[in-house]
Amino acid sequence: MSGPKAHIRSSEIGSAIAKAIHEHRVIPGTKLGEDELSEIYGVSRTLVRSALQWLSHEQLIDIQPNRGAFVSKPSLREAREIFEARALLEPKTARSAALRMTDQAATHLKAHINAEHAALAQNDIGKALRLSGVFHIEISRLADQQTIGRFIESLIARSSLIIALYRKRDSALCEKHAHNALLEALSQRDGAKAEELMQSHLVDLVSALDLSEKTTKQPSLKDALRPENP
Amino acid sequence: MSGPKAHIRSSEIGSAIAKAIHEHRVIPGTKLGEDELSEIYGVSRTLVRSALQWLSHEQLIDIQPNRGAFVSKPSLREAREIFEARALLEPKTARSAALRMTDQAATHLKAHINAEHAALAQNDIGKALRLSGVFHIEISRLADQQTIGRFIESLIARSSLIIALYRKRDSALCEKHAHNALLEALSQRDGAKAEELMQSHLVDLVSALDLSEKTTKQPSLKDALRPENP
DNA sequence: TATACAAATATTGTATACAATTTATCGACT
DNA sequence: AGTCGATAAATTGTATACAATATTTGTATA
């Protein structure tokens, strides 16, 4: 009875920007100027502003009054909250998905995983990252819970911001096996196992991040560039 | 690092409309014309449209392309999903809230309950309903989980639509005691009890609704107004 | 009387114009 | 030289104007 069918053009723009954010082609802090975007997409600022408001509500960008829109930089606290929320929602959702699993869905997910691996093979980290997120979203769709699914979708989008900001150096984005194991459990309609795998998968994701206090304050440039301290 | 501080005027309009929806002063299906609203709030359609897009994203209204914005009429399925989501989020949130409870918060919540009772005494059902929702939101704030809190807030707003559509006749909105008991458990910092009470409270809320299949299709006016059937 | 079509009206979608605010640039002063 | 301040440029906020679409009204016809 309700749906984001309206404002098609502006939501396309919003999706395009969201995708770029998700793929780390624009990084947190980047300013998204209205004139610039209206130039890029060949529309007036009206539609651009509409798209920006959408992104702002998704908390992917931060609109500062009279200053402009910037790609969000989630705080450490937000980062923790987002993964706590995912831990609360996704495992149970994976369980539901397992119970409603079909062969068709299995091949669909398998294709996704392959695309993800292909992207990794091409060293297209951004694309792999996004596809990884889409995999989680597909699972929530299978669970046939649109409401919770939307929440998860939103959390995953923001997760990509967190990864951009807090990822440990040299940490794997997503173990190759995690999604495969998940798919296995789903295909076997083993709800309990899917729930457990999803939970540990999320723990692994967090462990690839550096969410310690230190990172909170930026290097402050002044300190970072000062030649040396005794 | 992100917040809805921008577009202050339009978000005020959005809040005003959301409040009216929450209080059942405008009911599901009502058309929200842009000219009408811009007249009411003394602003241009630009700001009205901005507010409407916000409400649309909150799924409180449904924007139909070239037709206009209508207060959402959640389907039976959506209604069930929303309360399932609440059941997933709110009990654990209540538990967290209990652990972080302060005396100050207790008096604050107590005041809320009193205001709720006062509204009921004045037969201001709408206001009581909204305050009842705010009570739940306050609890989620106490849990100090902004992300989950926003989800809950969104779910509660949509719940008021569901209540408007599917409430059983003569069913109590909220047992007077439920919120008091919850406050009691919170004050005692009894997380387990708070979680349990919240869970059963939500069950009670659902049981005051008629979510059977039949209710799906509207009375269709034609049937409703036809004088009599044999 | 009811239905079908057509003009007229009203409403939403988009772009543009103007106002308000911030940011950048230049110059004066210490 | 560096900082403070004023003016100029650029950017966002809001309103208005025009275009596209839907709804209503009226009229003719069966």
Image (cartoon, coloured by chain):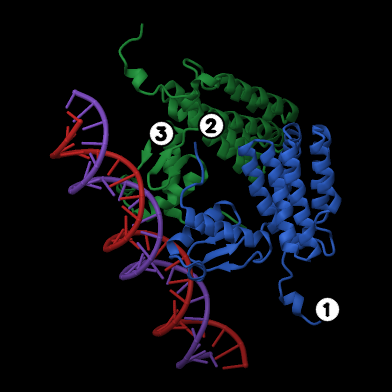
Chain colours: A blue, B green, C purple, D red
Q: Is residue C26 left or right of residue D27?
A: right
Q: Quadrant of residue A197?
A: top right
Give the residue pinned by disc 1: A229
Q: Amino acid at mark 2?
A: Ser
Residue B29, disc: 3
Q: Amino acid at mark 3?
A: Gly
Pointer 2 indicates a residue of which chain? B
Residue depicted at 65% across the width and 64% down the height: A28
* x then y, percent, for residue B67: 37, 44
Residue at the top extreme, as displayed:
B230
Pointer 3 indicates a residue of which chain? B
Q: Residues within 10 Å of mark 2 (few under 14, many from 20)?
A: many
Q: Quadrant of residue B198?
A: top right
In the depicted structure, whether residue A183 falls above or below residue A63:
above
Mark 1 vs mark 3: give the one in front. 3
Q: Secondary structure at mark 1?
A: loop
Residue depicted at 52% across the width and 54% down the height: A11
Q: Secondary structure at mark 3?
A: loop
Residue depicted at 80% across the width and 51% down the height: A205
Q: Quadrant of the C terminus of chain B?
A: top left
Q: Residues within 10 Å of mark 3 (few under 14, many from 20)?
A: few
Pointer 1 indicates a residue of which chain? A
Q: CA distance from mark 2 to mark 1?
A: 58 Å
Residue B159, disc: 2
Q: Secondary structure at mark 2?
A: helix
